[in-house]
């Protein structure tokens, strides 16, 4: 009976094979999708287990951890031994026998005590790649429905300069956005600016001290306020740090310094409240701050190739906070505690204490959690997302735990709404402490990016003295971005890492520039080929004729697996690992193969076809990570 089912399944698979639809399955959404290569091989081996009288689940195949012996392996016979009361090698022998003569495999060996060592056929690898190129997104397809996911990343604070702490959430969020989109989700990226807090009050206060004559500070002024901002971006950038330091004092400061700082801070808090409460003059300043800051912020993010669909911020939900608070009170979700309004979020299963989520301070002021909850409410109403993912420093974990719990308790979200916090680790300097400028100050993002760009420019100029200025600049920018982003993304988001400029910008090893170098190498060979008057895209891929070629082809077949695993676990580092492995496989092939000087035209064409696919996969990979390649470097 089992044998018959296997035969029927096989017949069906062969039928689609002969129509050129090999390796395809029919998904629930009634589109053909390419099965991932591991699933495909596992199915074939599962069939053989079943045909030999064993559970087909035992046929799960993994990439070999002994690449010197075989490409894939299956340990199912070991697992099945107990259940079937048989020596594992007897099971493995029986399965290997069933797979003999199967066109998917070059060799299936049963090895004592009971492993199956699997080598796929070159024809299978070629067929898979050809098929993959005909698929939308090269076979990447997350089955199931297409969720709408809101990504909250970037998190810049208006009027405060972007510093290196803002780098990771921006880079990681952008990559995850691109990966999830590619995997078939509807994704909305929102920067969620900090644009409503104390920094605004500090700027207003400092402005008032410097220019008390301005109409914003004249209580008798009723008319409209000037359209022009009373400061430039440079002045604004200078005002904030001054105001911020005036509002702080140190333990050992003299009493009068402390008092002055306290008074200044009190003034700034009052100004913040007045602005939030809708004072016309202070709101006018708020608009000026936004108008002057936003273009600068956009320019900064553009230079990082980070883009948002929404430029919303904390201020956008200000008006809906009172209703939300009423709702929480009316339903008894929120209660008063020492004058403040809180939602209890502790759970008896908690191993550590989770304090209540504060909704309003005792003076009635809203807090960080308040705007986040109101933003959730607004997002649910406006976009009906299935999921909201937040990217910011992992030190905000408790805040998000409280906010997520509060939003469930107060039913701002549906029970099935997927809320996740992807907390990033710190980018450290060579000393292992948070990255600083040489003199120990906070490193501005712009200076860091500029420093890497300048270095790369010198290097590009050195190796290409004749390169036109424009091209040298844009090439340097691309290499710099690859160094910065790859250096970051190749680490797990939650891990701290050391920012090592020498290492990150090296053209060798596990770096962005190495990947770009590989891409540029391929582009240059293809350009030479086309200069001979032929079209690279017309070249036909043949079966592999060397181990290196086969290894490269197998690496290509793993693309969809890599992207899907990155999408599933929100882990851009998987894409880095994959394109690094692919680049290595390509470079081994390149070093061992004459490509353009190959005399056999059939072989040469096949190599060119392979280069074309490799280029496409690598370019897609770096695009998912958020950077792009130059034509030469
Ligand atoms: N502006 C915040 C900060 O710099 C990050 C915002 C993160 N997103 C959020 N919804 N709270 O710390």
Image (cartoon, rainbow, N blue to C red):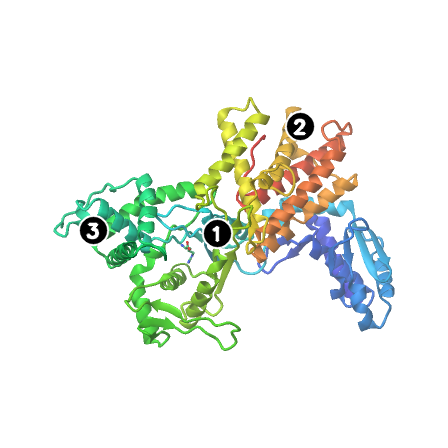
Q: Are marks 1 and 2 in contact (CB under 8 Å)?
A: no
Q: Nearer the viewer, mark 2 or mark 3?
A: 3
Q: Nearer the viewer, mark 1 or mark 2?
A: 1
Q: Is residue 337 visible?
A: yes
Sequence-wise first label, 3 or 1: 1
Q: On the rendered structure, is 456 left or right of 74?
A: left
Sequence-wise first label, 2 or 3: 3
Q: Image quarter for residue 263?
A: bottom left
Q: Residue at x 27, y 41 (%)?
A: 231
Q: Is mark 1 within 8 Å of ligand 1?
A: yes
**Of 491 and 388, which appears nearest the observer?**
491
The vertical placement of 208 against 354, above or below, is above
Give the quarter of the figure containing the N terminus: bottom right
Q: Image quarter for residue 379?
A: bottom left
- SS assignment at label 2: helix
Sequence-wise first label, 1 or 2: 1
**Crowd band around label 2 with a 10 angstrom C-alpha radius: few (<14), some (14–19), many (20+):** some
- The residue at which mark 1 appears reads as 169
Query: Distance from label 3 to label 1 (Cα)?
Result: 34 Å
Give the quarter of the figure containing the C terminus: top right
Q: On the rendered structure, is 616 left or right of 627?
A: right
- The residue at which mark 3 appears reads as 281
- SS assignment at label 3: helix
Query: Measured from the top left, where is residue 173 in percent x and y?
Result: 49, 51
Query: Measured from the top left, where is residue 428 in percent x and y?
Result: 53, 49
């Amino acid at each position: 009976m089992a044998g018959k089912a296997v035969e029927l399944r096989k017949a069906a698979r062969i039928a689609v094979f002969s129509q050129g639809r090999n390796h395809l399955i029919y998904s629930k959404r009634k589109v053909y999708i390419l099965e991932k290569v591991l699933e495909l091989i596992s199915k074939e081996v599962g069939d053989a287990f079943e045909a030999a009288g064993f559970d087909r689940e035992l046929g799960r195949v993994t990439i070999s951890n002994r690449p010197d012996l075989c490409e894939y392996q299956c340990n199912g016979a070991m697992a099945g031994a107990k259940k079937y009361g048989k020596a594992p090698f007897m099971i493995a022998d029986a399965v290997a026998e069933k797979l003999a003569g199967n066109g998917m495999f070059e060799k299936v060996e049963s090895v004592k005590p009971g492993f199956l060592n699997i080598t796929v056929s070159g024809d299978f690898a070629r067929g898979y790649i050809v098929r993959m190129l005909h698929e939308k997104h090269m076979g990447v397809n997350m089955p199931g429905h297409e969720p709408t996911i809101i990504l909250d990343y970037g998190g810049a604070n208006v009027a405060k300069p972007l510093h290196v702490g803002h780098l990771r959430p921006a880079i990681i969020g952008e990559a995850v956005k691109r990966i999830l989109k590619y995997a078939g989700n509807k994704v909305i990226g929102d920067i969620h600016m900090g644009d409503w807090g104390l920094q605004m009050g500090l700027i207003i206060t400092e402005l008032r001290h410097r220019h008390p004559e301005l109409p914003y500070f004249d209580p008798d002024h009723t008319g409209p306020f000037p359209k022009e901002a009373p400061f430039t971006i440079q002045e604004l950038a200078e005002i904030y740090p001054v105001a911020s330091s005036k509002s702080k004092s140190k333990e050992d400061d003299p009493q009068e310094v402390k008092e002055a700082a306290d008074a200044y801070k009190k003034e700034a808090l009052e100004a913040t409240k007045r602005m939030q409460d809708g004072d016309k003059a202070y709101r006018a300043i708020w608009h000026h701050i936004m108008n002057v800051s936003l273009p600068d912020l956009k320019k900064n993010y553009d230079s990082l190739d980070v883009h948002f669909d929404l430029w919303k911020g904390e201020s956008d939900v200000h008006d809906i906070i009172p209703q939300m608070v009423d709702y929480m009170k009316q339903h008894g979700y929120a209660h008063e505690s020492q004058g403040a309004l809180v939602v209890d979020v502790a759970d008896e299963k908690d191993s550590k204490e989770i304090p209540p989520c504060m909704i309003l301070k005792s003076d009635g002021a809203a807090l960080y959690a308040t705007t986040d909850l109101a933003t959730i409410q607004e997002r649910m109403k406006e976009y009906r997302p299935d999921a909201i993912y937040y990217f910011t420093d992992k030190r905000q974990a408790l805040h998000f735990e409280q906010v997520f719990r509060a939003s469930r308790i107060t039913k701002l979200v549906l029970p099935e709404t997927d809320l996740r916090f992807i907390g990033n680790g710190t980018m450290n300097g060579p000393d292992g402490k948070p990255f600083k400028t040489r003199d120990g100050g906070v490193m501005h993002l712009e200076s860091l990016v500029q420093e890497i760009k300048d270095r790369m420019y010198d290097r590009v100029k050195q190796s290409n003295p004749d390169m036109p200025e424009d091209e040298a600049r844009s090439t340097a920018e691309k290499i710099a971005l690859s160094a910065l982003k790859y250096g970051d993304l190749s680490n797990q988001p939650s891990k701290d890492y050391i920012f090592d400029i020498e290492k990150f910008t090296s053209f060798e090893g596990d770096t962005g520039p190495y990947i770009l170098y590989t891409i540029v190498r391929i582009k240059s060979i293809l350009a030479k080929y086309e200069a001979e008057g032929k079209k690279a895209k017309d070249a036909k891929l043949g079966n592999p004729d060397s181990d290196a070629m086969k290894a490269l082809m197998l690496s290509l077949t793993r693309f969809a697996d890599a992207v899907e695993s990155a999408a599933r676990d929100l882990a851009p580092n998987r894409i880095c690992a994959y394109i690094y492995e692919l680049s290595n496989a390509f470079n081994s092939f390149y070093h061992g193969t004459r490509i353009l000087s190959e005399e056999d035209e059939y072989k040469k064409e096949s190599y060119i076809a392979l280069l074309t696919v490799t280029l496409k996969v690598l370019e897609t990979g770096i695009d998912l990570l958020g950077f792009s390649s130059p034509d030469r470097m």
